[in-house]
Image: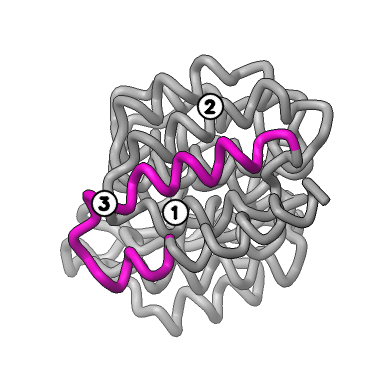
Amino acid sequence: MWILPTPHGYHRLAKNEAERCFASKIVIYAQKNKLCYFCTQNHNNMSVIPLLAKSLGIRSTDPNIELAEKIAASNDHEAITELVAILAGKDKTYQSDAIKVLYETAERNSMLLVPHSKVLMSLLTHKNNRMQWGAMTALDAIATHIKSDLYGKLTEILDVMNAGSVITRDHGMGILITLCGDTAYQSTIYPLINHQLLASPENQLPAYSEKTLPVVPAESLEQFCQTLSSRLPSMESETKKKRVEKVLKTATARLTKAKK
């Protein structure tokens, strides 16, 4: 490998230059007072750092989304491994970029993140809230493949949902709904979902009820209908209220049919 210093201070690497070097297996990143080019003989050992938003000097997350699309399309396990390693670093901006790429990748190619699910679970108690909800987002995306592991972390997931942001709660609810879709977990999971339906803010209730409807066990349909009915009188938004009423109507029809 070789390093070329530059006299121009902190160098902002142009996006097209980073992509060109990415394609040709040359690893580049900017450091204070020098621009470093690392050319490795092992073409498979290629860093994704040059394409992260921080490396490009771009404040938006667009570069991270584009990188996720490329990683997902190419099934790049090495890139995922490198991004996971960044999560253990001390640079919060690189951590933020890495978790963004990881959960965006998971939403496009979930199997790439499955081998790293335990690392993602460990981030649920991270002191940085960005890492918490980023990990929950990624876990939601891969939940179908790791149901047993998630079930084993149920207490932790619920604690984070209750204390976390709206995004954390939304994706935690997504995990619960995935688990409830499996008959092996329904008897334990549905009461937890029902609690969320009773306690959720009005803004989240329509989406939660819509997503829950397909996985409600037959024996819990009546409780589901009662829960939604109890929420309707206090709802202020007519639009959101109509969405919940539509779910309730469908659930009631299922319940009536089941009783015949």
Q: Nearer the viewer, mark 3 or mark 1?
A: 3
Q: What residue is drawn where x is 72% and y is 71%?
A: 73
- Left of 99 or right of it: where is 39? right
Q: Residues within 10 Å of mark 3 (few under 14, many from 20)?
A: few
Q: Residues within 10 Å of mark 2 (few under 14, many from 20)?
A: some
> What is the chief secondary structure element of the magenta stretch?
helix
The amino acid beneath tag 1 is Lys
Q: What residue is drawn where x is 73% and y is 39%?
A: 217
Front-lying residue, 129 or 237: 237
Q: Nearer the viewer, mark 2 or mark 3?
A: 3
Residue 132, relative to residue 11: is it above or below? above
Q: Which mark is residue 100?
A: 1
Q: Give the mark nearest the N terminus, 3 or 1.
A: 1
Q: Nearer the viewer, mark 2 or mark 1?
A: 2
Q: Is residue 220 magenta?
A: yes
- Left of 109 or right of it: where is 139? left
Q: Residues within 10 Å of mark 1 (few under 14, many from 20)?
A: many
Front-lying residue, 154 or 146: 154
Residue 59, relative to residue 200: is it above or below? below
Q: Which residues are magenta?
A: 219-244
SS for dot 3? helix
Q: Mark 2 and mark 3: span between their CA atoms?
A: 23 Å
- Left of 179 or right of it: where is 13? left
Q: Position of residue 229 (x, y in %)?
A: 41, 48
SS for dot 1? helix
Identify the residue under disc 3.
Answer: 233
Q: Position of residue 12 (x, y in %)?
A: 26, 70
Q: Mark 2 and mark 1: span between their CA atoms?
A: 28 Å
